[in-house]
Image (spheres, rainbow, N blue to C red):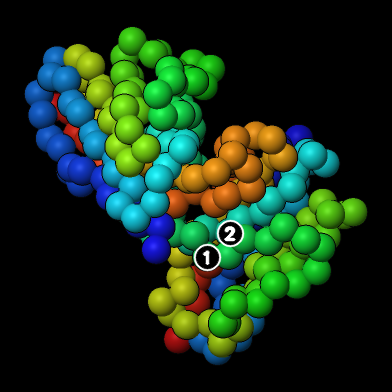
Amino acid sequence: QKEVEQNSGPLSVPEGAIASLNCTYSDRGSQSFFWYRQYSGKSPELIMFIYSNGDKEDGRFTAQLNKASQYVSLLIRDSQPSDSATYLCAVMRGGGGNKLTFGTGTQLKVEL
Amino acid sequence: GAVVSQHPSRVICKSGTSVKIECRSLDFQATTMFWYRQFPKQSLMLMATSNEGSKATYEQGVEKDKFLINHASLTLSTLTVTSAHPEDSSFYICSASWGRGNQPQHFGDGTRLSIL
């Protein structure tokens, strides 16, 4: 079992729709959860982070965390073609010195 | 805020050359910097973790004599690929974070290394 699992996709959504990206993790010692966006040929860019159970909203993005189910998700409202990228889920174990464990990423395609 | 600058962005050089890549945190003090490598259509692979003033911690399978890491200050880390060969061609990305827990990593723009 991979430590951080994501569906590789591609996930295709029409412009204006809600894109839902999911991630599960195996280490119950994980305390911090991050979503990065990576455009093809570019480096990852931090989108959101969440530490506590529940929802955290930032503009069109909402991160959701359920530690009991070891599940974290990212919702993108009003999806735009510019949101087309690979989204990386990353988890950080407490006391790990900020070291991240990444999933393999989900490719999102927002179609006109 | 949290800007990480990485140079050069692209390097093309002959086999046997040593290549140095710099990673700088521009607006914060980076207690920890990380070096990753990414091959096309693959996930990020952590190579090593470096803390200012101490030796880098390398991931299993990464040759420390091949990939020399120096983290001389709280704003600068360097990765030197020694005697590079074509199989070292890859996208190298650094990241930096501050504090000792639960802080996000902020990534540089990456260096695309091509060894002929």
Q: From the viewer's perspective, is residue A34 above or below residue B63?
A: below
At 62% across and 61% down in the image, what residue appears?
Answer: A49
Image location of residue B11, percent across then percent down? 15, 37
Q: Is residue A9 found left or right of B14 in the rendered image? A: right
Side (left or right) of A8 relative to B44: right
Which numbered disc, 2 or 1, marks the residue that appears first in the sequence? 2
Vertical position of residue A105 compared to residue B16: above or below: below
- Tell me how far mark 2 sits from mark 1, CA to CA: 5 Å
Given the image, on which type of amino acid does mark 1 rest?
Ile
Residue farthest to the right, as pictured:
A68
Q: What residue is rendered at 46% in x and 64% in y?
A: A85
Q: Which residue is mark 2?
A: A35
Measuring from the top left, give residue A73's x and y in whole percent: 70, 64
Front in this rendered view, residue B4 or A18: B4
Residue at image coords 31%, 19%? B68
Observer-nearest of A13 and B16: B16
Please report, as a chain letter, where disc 2 is located. Answer: A
Q: Say whether marks 2 and 1 touch (CB < 8 Å).
A: yes
Q: Quadrant of residue B17?
A: top left
Amino acid type assigned to the residue bearing label 2 in the image = Trp
Mark carried by residue A47: 1
Q: Is residue A77 left or right of residue B91?
A: right
Quarter of image, res A61: bottom right
Both labels 2 and 1 in a single chain: yes
| Image quadrant where one finds the C terminus of chain B | top left
Q: Residue furthest left?
A: B14
Q: Where residue B95 sits: x, y (%)? A: 41, 44
Mark count: 2
Which chain is disc 1 placed on? A
Quick one: SS at disc 1?
Answer: strand
Q: Is residue B66 visible?
A: yes
Residue B42 visible? The answer is: no
